Image (cartoon, rainbow, N blue to C red):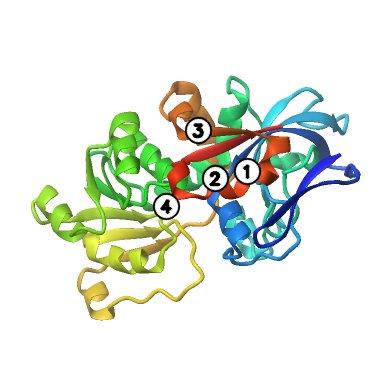
Amino acid sequence: MRTILLEEPYRLRQVDSRPPVRKAGEALVKVKRIGVCGTDMHAFRGRQPYFTYPRVLGHELAVEVVEADANSDVSPGDLCAVMPYLSCGACIACRAGKTNCCASLKVLGVHVDGGMTDLLSVPVATLIRGDGLSLEQMALVENQSIGAHAVRRAAPAPGETALVVGAGPIGLGVIQAVKAKGARVIVADVSEDRLDFCRKSLHVDDVILAPDDVAGELARMTSGELAPVVFDATGHPGSMERSFDFVSSGGRLVFVGLVQADIRFNDPEFHRRELTLYASRNATREDFEWVMEAMRKGAMVTDPIITHKVAFDDLAGSFEGLLRPEAKVIKAMVEV
């Protein structure tokens, strides 16, 4: 079967591989769509934490069930979204329902081989039937669920102002989840094109072009109060450190992006405003189900986010081009 292997940074190659052997409790699935994620791009460049080579990338997946146990929750022919997080179910985090930060978590396409292949065998518990959704929507669920989880962590109230820093695919998921909660959304990004997309396609309330005076612009928009909730979805250490300056007294800051760096902040100012700092990692089944229902209701748009489509057989040769700024990729979708 066909498999795309990242052998080392900047070396992606399509190879022939053996079909997986399905174990009890797993389902054999045919991969139908693969979303190309920032994680894949970081891994391609050699910048992804907790990553080893060689690796089969791919964790934003829409699949069709080929084979499963007779008493399984899924049946051959079912179209499903995949939760790519393989949790142990027994550690302190799992016992508390926080399977997204399991102490021994493994993620498809990161810690173990993922879905850039024809066939995959995955635990049935990771599959969620995508009734009423297109294949493209199912492949977007994981990406948008990361934003939804971050928003659930911060719990913005209706009418509350939220600043989202970074309008990449993860940031877009945050924006849509915040809007669904009824909060006011302001977006800051370095790209005028991304901000224009947020205005026209996501109908955000205000935008700020960075690296202009984001704090000053935000203060002007909020009568000097800044934002009670700030989400940084950049994965950039400088941006993450500056985000402390955007939070209202008594407010919440959520780091959605992950970076290989130490993050520093001024402790006296942190205490003076009694800020709450959240890390947000991955998502849970609750987040997946919330996003899927929001997609069904039209509360989360999907078609505008997919700006590029690539055939599986063309991916290895075209992948590096998707990373170039001039390509203006928001989300690339691989058709298998």
Whether the residues at callouts 1 and 4 have beta carbons within 8 Å, the answer is no
Q: Residues within 10 Å of mark 2 (few under 14, many from 20)?
A: some
- Drawn side of residue 39 relative to residue 162, left or right: right
Closer to the N terminus: mark 3 or mark 2?
Answer: 3
Q: Residues within 10 Å of mark 3 (few under 14, many from 20)?
A: some
- Reading the image, the residue beneath label 1 is 318
Q: Is residue 51 above or below residue 266?
A: above
Residue at image coords 34%, 32%: 202
Residue 76, x across and y down, in percent: 82, 25
- Reading the image, the residue beneath label 4 is 153
Q: Which mark is residue 322?
A: 2
Residue 207, x across and y down, in percent: 23, 44
Q: Secondary structure at mark 4?
A: helix
Amino acid type assigned to the residue bearing label 2 in the image? Leu
Amino acid type assigned to the residue bearing label 4 in the image? Arg
Residue at image coords 59%, 44%: 36
Between label 1 and label 4, give the one nearer the viewer: 1
Q: Report how far apart the C-alphas of labels 1 and 4 lie in the structure.
A: 37 Å
Visible in this render: residue 97? no
Between label 4 and label 2, give the one nearer the viewer: 2
Amino acid type assigned to the residue bearing label 1 in the image? Ser
Q: Residues within 10 Å of mark 4 (few under 14, many from 20)?
A: some
Whether the residues at callouts 1 and 2 have beta carbons within 8 Å, the answer is yes
Whether the residues at callouts 1 and 3 have beta carbons within 8 Å, the answer is no
Instruction: Indicate the quadrant containing the N terminus: top left, top right, bottom left or bottom right.
Output: top right
Residue at image coords 43%, 30%: 300
Residue 80, x across and y down, in percent: 68, 30
Between label 1 and label 3, give the one nearer the viewer: 1
Q: Is residue 70 above or below residue 88?
A: above
Closer to the N terminus: mark 4 or mark 3?
Answer: 4
